[in-house]
Amino acid sequence: MPRKDFDPATVEADGRPASKARLFDPAQEAPWRGSLEGIALGGPTTVLTYGTDEIGAGPRLHVHPYDETFIIIEGHARFFVGDTTLDASAGEVVLGPAGVPHKFQNLGPGRLQTIDIHHSPRWIQTDLE
């Protein structure tokens, strides 16, 4: 079904050129890890990829002053976001709201691979554990 959410004539291009950069090297054996700050692309979001084959592994508890959106590409993860625990699997998306401590871990079996979108042109984080 075609979409027409706005009139393109009402938006003026801001003059930024299209750009690209590498988040991870696909020639390297997965799981992949990498980060790309939005500032490098001239954009408003920072993108990370996190992958692990180790059951129970994941980032330590941390917090950001902006929202973070997690896209599970492969596997199963358990997210701890403030007082909420969510299990998510490939194809699902989890939101970590600004200022709410969060972490996740690989539930297995097998690999966990995520794409993590930081709603900031720079990666800003405070580790809590």
Image: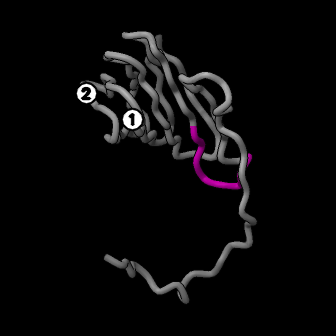
Residue plotted at (58% across, 40% down): 47
Q: Dot 2: few (<14), some (14–19), or many (≥20) neighbours within 10 Å?
A: some
Name the mark nearer the viewer: 2 or 1: 1
Element on which disc 1 rests:
strand
Q: Amino acid at mark 1?
A: Ile
Q: Which mark is residue 16?
A: none
Answer whether residue 7 is magenta in the image: no
Label 2 – label 1 distance at C-alpha? 11 Å
Q: Quadrant of residue 76?
A: top left
Residue plotted at (24% across, 25% down): 85
Q: Which residue is mark 1?
A: 72
Answer whether residue 44 is magenta in the image: yes
Q: Nearer the viewer, residue 12 or 92?
A: 92
Residue 63 coordinates in the image, percent (x, y): 47, 27
Residue 90 coordinates in the image, percent (x, y): 34, 35
Q: Which residue is mark 2?
A: 87
Q: Dot 1: few (<14), some (14–19), or many (≥20) neighbours within 10 Å?
A: many
Q: Quadrant of residue 83?
A: top left
Start-end of magenta stretch: 40-47
Residue positioned most to the bottom? 9
Earlier in the chain: of badge 2 and badge 1, it is: 1
Residue 98 coordinates in the image, percent (x, y): 43, 39
Residue plotted at (39% across, 81% down): 4
In the image, residue 99 above or below residue 108: below
Residue 57 appears in the picture as rendered? yes
In the image, residue 12 above or below residue 111: below
